[in-house]
Image (tube, helix red, strand yellow):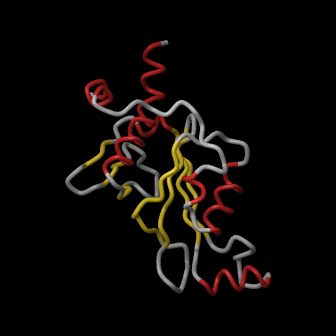
Amino acid sequence: MAGMTSQRLPPPRLQPLGRGSEAFGRLPPRCRALAERLLGEAEVFLLVRTATKVDVGSWFGPSRVCACALADELLLFAADNSPLTALLGWLGRGEGTGRLGRFYAERIAMRDLRDSTYNHVTGELLLAPATAARVRKLRMAPLEGYQLLAQIHRGHEERRDA
């Protein structure tokens, strides 16, 4: 079944994004800073700011999740972008916030996402089996969803060909 699905997907991106790319430039400043901290020197092949929200402990409500497709794993993260947290971080105050504020981050190995699918009716990428993941559904536009799915299946196709 995965073979049939991957035949209909766009080709996976094989060239990593530069840190100065448009995708990184569209991130809010705190998300961009968090991405830089979490990624280090890792190559990013796709970066999507999803419509899915997760609680990061902000008084202003949940924050949007960003998804980064790396070579062998999917990095999900969200930063508290509230003005109060930004001010407290700038002042160096705030319990457990630091300069980046409160955040959510999770890494999932691509091998643990082999059964993932995109539901075009709901607009959600279902991360499967990934049973231990905190976030298991990502709301995003169809083009982004299918491209992320292509990145997920890329590793499975390469292993099968070897």
Percent of width and height locating residue 38: 67, 54
| Residue 9, percent from left and from top | 32, 33
- Residue drawn at x 61%, y 64% is 31
Whether residue 162 sits left or right of residue 129 in the image: it is right
Res. 1 image quadrant: top left
Above/below status of 104 relative to 75: below
- The x, y position of residue 134, in whole percent, is 46, 58
Say if residue 108 shows up in the picture. Answer: no
Q: Is residue 153 above or below residue 100?
A: above
Looking at the image, which residue is at 48% across and 59% down? 49
| Residue 24 sits in quarter | bottom right
Tell which of 10 and 158 is nearer to you: 10
Kindly identify the residue that appears in the image at 31 percent across and 49 percent down.
Answer: 142
- Residue at image point 44% right, 37% down: 152
Q: Of all residues shown, which one is farthest toward the right?
A: 92
Q: Is residue 63 above or below residue 22?
A: below
